[in-house]
Amino acid sequence: MEIEEEILDFINNGHKDHFTDVTIDCVIFGYHELQLKVLIGKRFGVNGSSFPGGHIGRNETLTGAASRILKDRTSLNHIFLQQFHTFGDSMFRLKDFNNDLPQIAKDSLPADNWLFQRTFVVGFYALIDFSKVKIKKDFFFEQFAWLDINDIPPLLYDHNEMLDKALTALRNQIYHQPIGYNLLPEKFTLPEIIALYETILNKKLDRRNFPKKLMSLEIMIKLDEKRNIGQHRAPYLYKFDKEKYNKALKEGIILVF
């Protein structure tokens, strides 16, 4: 009963607290076992999946709303996120949004409800530590799954296009901002960060010169620790210099592969 009341209250009164013509969708990237994954949600009562998202509170900033939506979904704070595109060429919400609502909503939803208004969608992509995520569901999603970016099925709305644009933005951004702090464990080896960049870029890198280029940015610290991974194999561990990493994140870098 509480969930039903929550749904109906959002449907009937949500426009008082939220903007009605702009929403946020989030492409959430995680890295696990040499795979770049995204979080996909199965919609309640709909034969299809989409990326999670939400509405913007009238007293929220755009980035603040995106941070809240991501925390509500992943239980994590201080997530790296980047706005990458605004979607407004599709008219899908005028036609299809009613199919996404729970049955209790369909039974009582008037034709002029605020949820039927045309919406423009601001896309954010996020980079998170796969191992720390605790997924939370809500009344719009039955379940969530992490899928490899190469195994994404046809998604609802324009979300396949959204993924393509998010990947393009991430791959372009990797040349100008340090990527890795939110995707790797606190301590990592050079082969591990090289594998991360190769996975994101979907290409092989020069494994002799690339580590030198990374070290030249002075955002990583070589530790006096090794990881034993087999006989005669004990690579040194590294970690990010958080202060220099944040400076590079703010000021930008140029990394030529």
Image: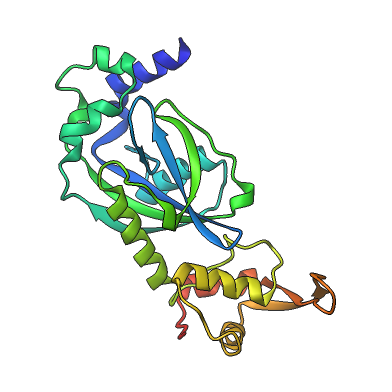
- Quarter of the image for residue 56 reads top left
At 43% from the left and 58% from the top, the residue drawn is 150
Q: Quadrant of the N terminus?
A: top left
Percent coordinates x, y for residue 95 in the rendering: 16, 33
Percent coordinates x, y for residue 86 in the rendering: 25, 54
How is the model colour-coded? rainbow
Q: Please, is residue 71 above or below residue 31 in the view?
A: above
- Quarter of the image for residue 47 reads top left
Can residue 151 be seen here? The reply is yes
Can residue 117 be seen here? The reply is no
Furthest residue in direction right, as rendered = 231
At 58% from the left and 72% from the top, the residue drawn is 195
Looking at the image, which is closer to me, 216 or 134? 134
Looking at the image, which is closer to me, 255 or 157? 157
Furthest residue in direction top, as rendered = 1
Q: Please, is residue 21 above or below residue 6 in the view?
A: below
Percent coordinates x, y for residue 106 in the rendering: 26, 17
Instruction: Give the side of residue 72 with respect to residue 103, left or right.
Output: right
Q: Please, is residue 83 above or below residue 222 in the view?
A: above
Percent coordinates x, y for residue 157 in the rendering: 25, 43
At 32% from the left and 44% from the top, the residue drawn is 155
At 31% from the left and 33% from the top, the residue drawn is 18
